[in-house]
Image (cartoon, coloured by chain):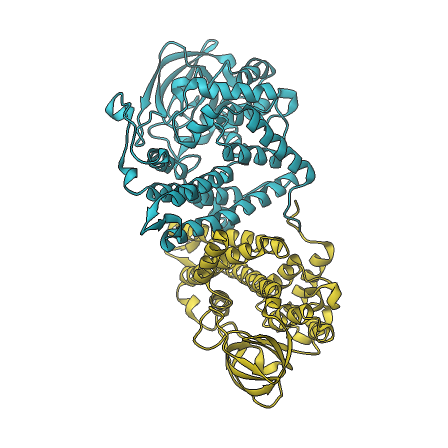
Amino acid sequence: MDFGFTEEQTMLGDSLARMLERGADAAALFDLGAGAALIPEEAGGFGGGGADILVVFRTLGRAGAVTPLLDSVVLGAGILAAAGETDLAQAAAGGAARIAVALDEPGQRYDGVIRTTAADGRLTGEKSVVHGAEDATHLIVAATDGLYLVDAGAGGVTLRGYGLMDGGRAAELSLADAPARRIGDTALLDRPLAGAILALCSDALGVMERAVDLTTDYLRTRKQFGRPIGSFQAIQHRMADLLTEVEQARSAVWNLAGHLDGPDRDRHVAATKSLLGRVARQVAEETIQLHGGIGMTEEYELAPLARRLLAADARFGDSDHHLERFIAVSAA
Amino acid sequence: MDMSFSPEDQAFRAEVRQFLRDRLPERLSEKVRLFQELGKAEIEEWHAVLNEKGWLAGNWPREFGGAGWTAIQRHIFEEESALAHAPRVLPFGIAMLGPVLQKFGSRQQQDRFLPRILNGQDWWCQGYSEPGSGSDLASVKTTAVRDGDHYVVNGQKTWTTLGQHANWIFCLVRTDPAAKAQEGISFLLIDLTSPGITVRPIVLLDGNPEVNEVFFDDVRVPAENLVGEENKGWTYAKYLLTHERTNIAGVGFATAGLAALKRIARGQVSGGRPLIQNPLFAAHVARVEIDLMAMATTNLRMLAQAAAGQVPGAESSMLKLKGTQIRQAINDLTRRAVGPWALAFPSEALEGANDALPPGPPEAAAATRAYLNNRKLSIYGGSNEIQRGIIAKSLLGL
């Protein structure tokens, strides 16, 4: 039994952390190989396993970095690799191509109901909250009969972009007879989506760890009534409960990373995402409360962390959605 | 990263499983499964079976007659034992006193007491808590005054688990009333058959006299029964409390309890379908199962760290906290799963002899007893509030 990482994984995480500290941009991350580390060898990468995803995204979360690695690489290149579109997958992993993946449709919450249709190689439909769509060179679109590849600049493609709670951007996507090429069945989504959920949960874990560090420093230095507020038992016990839940979250992320390519993947996806979503909300709420007023301000570092944690719950199915999935998978 | 057990550990698990299949009498496992109280003879019977195999003291080094298991092997044994509903190995002699004598006891004490723990000649109980000393253990008031080659002990211990079966008790006693709280305490071994000792059972809210009060009235204890040095008992007590931490999370108990809960919930009907299919109830069960999956991995991560020589810090407090929350949640759901059957409460201690069979499935009466009895989980072994204090202190240092 080994809960640690390979030497290469540790080195990648360390160099990534150092680069991010110096304010590296997405191009620099791709140059380092952060993208290639997230897809398997047969698709031209050198990783793509659970532990690779965990190391990279936990580091990104800790640093608060907003990158295209989840959407364009884990999800986008992952689907392309599964579909045998190796060249484009490699281009996405190297940063030369940007992929946005359009699955959900307006008003369908997390149910995955798809109404977008394909006829004569053209797609028509509406897609909602498509992450990274404005920067994409290619779109992968789920239609009723499978997955399609769409050139982002093609006719019939309209985007209405907006900022997101986690600092990224997304768009509402309209497709009106947009030219598209079918690349495979929606079943191709299973592993890339599980990988993306692991990436999101690992990112959230990194964010939680950073939020806990900030809160710890604050409780040790902030004084009221002549004492550090961390010396008050009411504060200590809240913090102890929070740490215990973060420890649970850490183990849940390890569970999914360790079972990402095993027979129990679906069960672990549901368990981990449900637990992470719940704990992410709790960490956001509790760290704000433990800080008091300063935790409410945009100027202080906690604000983006709290929003990023809430975003992690709201994406790919929230904690209730995955609790239901867990029950369904367990009964099957 | 590799989440699977090594081939050696898997082989060990298979061996434990086979042993339990061959040697665990159903007579005992049925009682454990139904949370019925085991008698003294039944506990001793299981200890003897384990001792014959050399597995009674998994945590002891081989030189003292133990199995010398690794932390992971101990975990596997405890998990398999719980899943098979084996009686638990009583911790007082094996897990608590044994390691203290091995580390701090004299050669004579080791030779005299350790074999008797293994062969069942002695049944030890723990004399730590007092009416005025619960979480604040260093405030113990029971005194031991040196008189020639004896100590004279006066005072009272309480919450002494299964003390009614014991013939020996290890006690924290105050030997220097002038010293600061922790510094005047000694660790003393006392023969419970000595004149001046009274053991009085305390009936708990589950109807069982599981714990006792022990009174000491001018009890003369040979000075050779002092462990280590006089006034250094607090060090030994702390060692005892931190030594045996592998099973603090109770993963095996929780796993067995969850399986039982699901079995019961499949057999109960709610709204015309099995209770396990009631979405609200299923959500309660799923939530605790997901928590358990994570906690079990935390437990294994800590064991792997311990195996690599790292000393666990606040993690064992987190395991105690989360582990007891999970087990209490399972007990709560199990009691609620049997619905109105949970109302039946046949109790010999409260009603006198009662051989009426309780109504409902056999698990029903057990569910209520288990729920009530396991309220203790968050109180004993350092209450969960004490654990929160330890966790916060290790992080904040305040």
Image position, residue B319 (x, y; %): 50, 43
Q: Quadrant of residue A194?
A: bottom right
Query: Judging from the image, what is the letter of the chain drawn in cyan?
Result: B
- Left or right for B284, reference A183: left
In the image, residue B129 above or below residue B325? above
Counting every numbered tag in the picture gives 0
Q: Horizontally, is B17 left or right of A238 in the view? A: right
Taking depth in this image into account, of B150 and A272 the one nearest to the observer is A272
Q: Is residue A303 visible?
A: yes
Q: Residue furthest bottom?
A: A155
What residue is drawn where x is 40% and y is 45%? B266
**Would residue B389 be seen by someone viewing this image from the given angle?**
no
View extreme (left): residue:
B351
Q: Which chain is yellow?
A: A
- Where, quadrant-wise, is the N terminus of chain A in this rendering? top right
In the picture, measured across the screen, residue A278 lies left or right of residue B49, that is left
Q: Residue at 71% x, 63% y: name it.
A: A40
Q: Is residue A200 above or below residue B184?
A: below
Seen in the picture, residue B11 relative to A180 is either above or below; the reply is: above
Along the viewing direction, whichever of B113 and B54 lies nearer the viewer: B54
Residue A149 position within the rendered picture, expressed as x and y whole percent measured from the top left: 63, 79
- Residue B177 drawn at (x, y percent): 40, 24
Rendered location of residue A309, percent (x, y): 49, 65
Foreground residue, A83 or A56?
A83
Front residue of B171/B35: it is: B35
